[in-house]
């Protein structure tokens, strides 16, 4: 029995392939987990819209402006945004916000719904968002103040 050699399960080349495969598998799992985590913690378009509208309701116009996209800020300076909010008093007189639809793409999203103001009028809105550095930002705000319902 002295002449028996131990049998090895793998050749050195096979060990390298197994080690590389294990390393690659672990890397894929880590990257997948990070992707899922970043997707789970990134606010959704409707979350940003609600934060924006609640900032306006609390008369935090600067906070609402901070949630707008760079393109929005290029076209609308803060003073112009203040005038827009003052002109559309419903933005500061809202009681509730109801979101009806969320159409989310890779780089843009559109959220529609109703703002109910203190006189129980419902004002339809459409807010367009864009993705900037993996965050949703307000690009456009449309209020239909002519067609409000009671």
Image (cartoon, grey):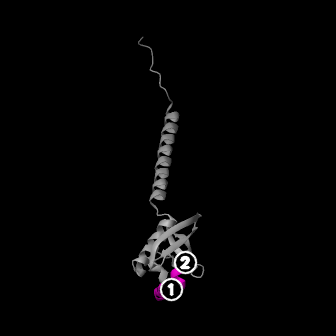
Instruction: Judge the density around disc 2: few (<14), some (14-19), many (≥20) Cα neighbours within 10 Å.
Output: some
| Mark 2, residue position | 141
Q: Residue furthest top?
A: 1
Quarter of the picture containing the C terminus is: bottom right
Residue 31 seen in render: yes
92 left or right of 102? Answer: left
Secondary structure under tag 2 reads strand
- Tell me where the magenta segment starts and ends, as one range: 71-88
Quarter of the picture containing the N terminus is: top left
Write the residue at 48% across / 70% down. Answer: 97
Residue 35 on the magenta segment: no
Residue 134 seen in render: no
Q: Earlier in the sequence, mark 1 or mark 2?
A: 1
Q: Measured along the vertical axis of the image, is residue 34 above or below residue 106?
A: above
Q: Which label number is shown at residue 84?
A: 1
Secondary structure under tag 1 reads helix
Residue 77 on the magenta segment: yes
Write the residue at 47% across / 69% down. Answer: 50
Write the residue at 52% across / 85% down. Answer: 76
Magenta part, dominant SS: helix
């Amino acid at each position: 029995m002295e002449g028996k050699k131990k049998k090895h399960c793998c050749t050195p080349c096979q060990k390298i392939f197994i080690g590389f495969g294990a390393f690659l598998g672990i890397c894929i799992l880590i990257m997948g987990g990070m992707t899922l985590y970043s997707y789970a913690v990134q606010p959704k378009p409707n979350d940003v819209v609600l934060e924006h509208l609640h900032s306006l309701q609390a008369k935090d116009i600067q906070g609402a402006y901070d949630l707008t996209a760079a393109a929005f800020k290029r076209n609308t300076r803060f003073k112009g945004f203040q005038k827009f909010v003052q002109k559309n008093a419903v933005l500061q007189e809202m009681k509730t916000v109801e979101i009806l639809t969320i159409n989310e793409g890779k780089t843009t999203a559109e959220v529609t719904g109703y703002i109910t103001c203190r006189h129980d009028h419902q004002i339809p809105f459409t807010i367009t968002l864009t993705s900037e550095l993996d965050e949703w930002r307000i690009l456009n705000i449309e209020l239909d103040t002519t067609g409000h319902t009671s």
